[in-house]
Image (cartoon, rainbow, N blue to C red):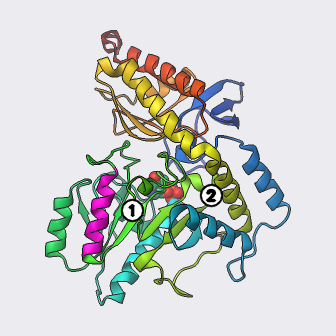
C-alpha cells in the first residue's frame, strides 16, 4: 500500500486503514480485527462508534449544526455548566482542538501579566512537554524536533526540567516577568512520564503559583475526560488550576476543545479579546454532552479499576524482564529495557494497535470502557509480544 502523493507527508503512516470500529476494536477492509490500545490517541474514551454519541450527533446534525457565537448557543451553555460542575472551574471557552485550547491559555497568561503591569509576560514550561503544533504551542513544547525549522519562535517562555521545583524557584528569583506555569499532570507525548511525587507535584506547583501570583495552567488535553481515573487528573491532587485546557477525550472523536478558568483567571477575557468561528457549535456541544453522559456513567471509575488491573498484569507477566509501568488510570507507559519501536509493526500484524513513545515506552491509551476480560486479553497479548521481542533469540535474528 503506497501513500498517495497528494497528501502532505507530515505523517509516516502505517500501511493499514480501518473501515469500522466497535468499542475497543477496529476492523480493516479485509475484516481483520485489531485490539486498539490507542483510542485515536486518547480520544475515543467511550470506544469506537459509541451508540449514545452517534445518536446525539445524528439527531443534532438533522436539527441544527451551526449558528455562530454572535448568538446564544444553549447547548454550549449546558456544556459549560456541565464541565464547570465536574471540574470545579468557573467559566469555559470552546474551540476545536487541543492546540487552540492552549493558545487561549497562553493569551490568558499574557493578560494576567498586563493586568499587573508586566509588559513582557513569561510562562514557565517544561522539558519533554507537548502542547501542540501552532507557533505558540510548539514554542511551549519541550521537544527540539518539533521546533526545528520554524524559528523565530514565540517569545515569552522559560523552560525548566519537569518535576524540578528548585529550577522553578531559581527562575522566580531571577525573572520578575513570570506570570504562569503551563504543565501536563502526566507528560503524554514523551512516553507517559510522571513526577516522583505523583500528583503531589501539582500541589507544589499550586503553592508556588499562589506565592507568586502566577496562573497555574494545567494542560489536560490528554489526561482529561477520565483518562487517569478522575474526570481531570488534578483532582487526584485536591487542587484547582487557574486555567485548564482540554480536548482529545471531550468529544469522543468529534473535534472540540475547551479552556476553563477559575480564581484569578476568571475575569481576564472580555468581549473582543478572543474568538472562533466554529468553537462550541450546537453539533460539537451535543457530541461532548453525550460523551460526558457516557463518561460519568461509571466509565471514569472503570478507568481507575482497569488501569490497576492492567498494571498488576504487566508486573506479573513481565516484571522478571525488568519491565515496569508508569502512569495512572488508563494512561500507562510500559517501559521496556531496550528500544522497542519495532514492536508497533509486530503487534499490528498480530492484531494489536500500539503506540511506542520515547523509543522504549509502549504508551497505552485504550478506550476507558474496556472490560476485565478485555484488559486481561490486552495484557496477555502484549506480554507475549514483548516477551518474544525481549528474548535473546530475537536479538540474534535481528
Ligand atoms: C494532543 C495534545 C495537544 C494538542 O492537541 P491537538 O488537538 O492535536 O491540537 C496538546 N497538549 C497535549 C498534552 C496533548 O496530548
Earlier sequence position, callout 2 versus callout 1:
1
Which residues make up the magenta segment? 199-211
- The foreground one among 146 and 360 is 360
Q: In percent of the image, x 50 and y 24: which residue is there? A: 347
- The foreground one among 1 and 270 is 270
Residue 45 can be seen in this image: no
| Predominant secondary structure, magenta span | helix
Q: Label 2 CB, ligand 1: below 8 Å? A: yes
Q: Is residue 48 above or below residue 360?
A: below
204 inside magenta stretch: yes
Where residue 139 sits, quadrant-wise, is bottom left
Q: In percent of the image, x 40 and y 83: which residue is there? A: 111
Measuring from the top left, give residue 284's x and y in whole percent. 69, 62
Q: Find disc 1 in the rendering and name its residue.
A: 239
Q: Find disc 2 in the rendering and name its residue.
A: 255
Measuring from the top left, give residue 223's x and y in whole percent. 46, 51
Amino acid at each position: 500500500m503506497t501513500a498517495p502523493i497528494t497528501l502532505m507527508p507530515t505523517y509516516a503512516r502505517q500501511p493499514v486503514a480501518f473501515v469500522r470500529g466497535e468499542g475497543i476494536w477496529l476492523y480493516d477492509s479485509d475484516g481483520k480485527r485489531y485490539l486498539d490500545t490507542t483510542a485515536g490517541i486518547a480520544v475515543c474514551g467511550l470506544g469506537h462508534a459509541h451508540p449514545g454519541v452517534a445518536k446525539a450527533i445524528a439527531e443534532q446534525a438533522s436539527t441544527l449544526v451551526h449558528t455562530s457565537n454572535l448568538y446564544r448557543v444553549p447547548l454550549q451553555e449546558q456544556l459549560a455548566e456541565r464541565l464547570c460542575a465536574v471540574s470545579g472551574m468557573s467559566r469555559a471557552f470552546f474551540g476545536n482542538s487541543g492546540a487552540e485550547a492552549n493558545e487561549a491559555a497562553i493569551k490568558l497568561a499574557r493578560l494576567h501579566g498586563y493586568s499587573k503591569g508586566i509588559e513582557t509576560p513569561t510562562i514557565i514550561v517544561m522539558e519533554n512537554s507537548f502542547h501542540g503544533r501552532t507557533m505558540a504551542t510548539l514554542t511551549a513544547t519541550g521537544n527540539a524536533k518539533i521546533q526545528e525549522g520554524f524559528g523565530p519562535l514565540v517569545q515569552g517562555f522559560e523552560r525548566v526540567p519537569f518535576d524540578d521545583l528548585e529550577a522553578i524557584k531559581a527562575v522566580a528569583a531571577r525573572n520578575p516577568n513570570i506570570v504562569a506555569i503551563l504543565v501536563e499532570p502526566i507528560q503524554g507525548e514523551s512516553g507517559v512520564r510522571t513526577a516522583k511525587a505523583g500528583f503531589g507535584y501539582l500541589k507544589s506547583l499550586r503553592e508556588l503559583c499562589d506565592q507568586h501570583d502566577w496562573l497555574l495552567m494545567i494542560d489536560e488535553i490528554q489526561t482529561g475526560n477520565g483518562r487517569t481515573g478522575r474526570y481531570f487528573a488534578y483532582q487526584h491532587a485536591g487542587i484547582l488550576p487557574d486555567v485548564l485546557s482540554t480536548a482529545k477525550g471531550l468529544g469522543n472523536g468529534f473535534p472540540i476543545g475547551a479552556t476553563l478558568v477559575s480564581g484569578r483567571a476568571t475575569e481576564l477575557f472580555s468581549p473582543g479579546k478572543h474568538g472562533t468561528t466554529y468553537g462550541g457549535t450546537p453539533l460539537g456541544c451535543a457530541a461532548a454532552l453525550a460523551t460526558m453522559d457516557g463518561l460519568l456513567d461509571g466509565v471514569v471509575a472503570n478507568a481507575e479499576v482497569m488501569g490497576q488491573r492492567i498494571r498488576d498484569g504487566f508486573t506479573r507477566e513481565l516484571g522478571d524482564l525488568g519491565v515496569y509501568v508508569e502512569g495512572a488510570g488508563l494512561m500507562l507507559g510500559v517501559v521496556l529495557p531496550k528500544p522497542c519501536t519495532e514492536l508497533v509493526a509486530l503487534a499490528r500484524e498480530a492484531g494489536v494497535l500500539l503506540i511506542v513513545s520515547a523509543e522504549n515506552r509502549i504508551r497505552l491509551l485504550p478506550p476507558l470502557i474496556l472490560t476485565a476480560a478485555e484488559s486481561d486479553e490486552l495484557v496477555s497479548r502484549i506480554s507475549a509480544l514483548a516477551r518474544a521481542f525481549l528474548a535473546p533469540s530475537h536479538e540474534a535474528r535481528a
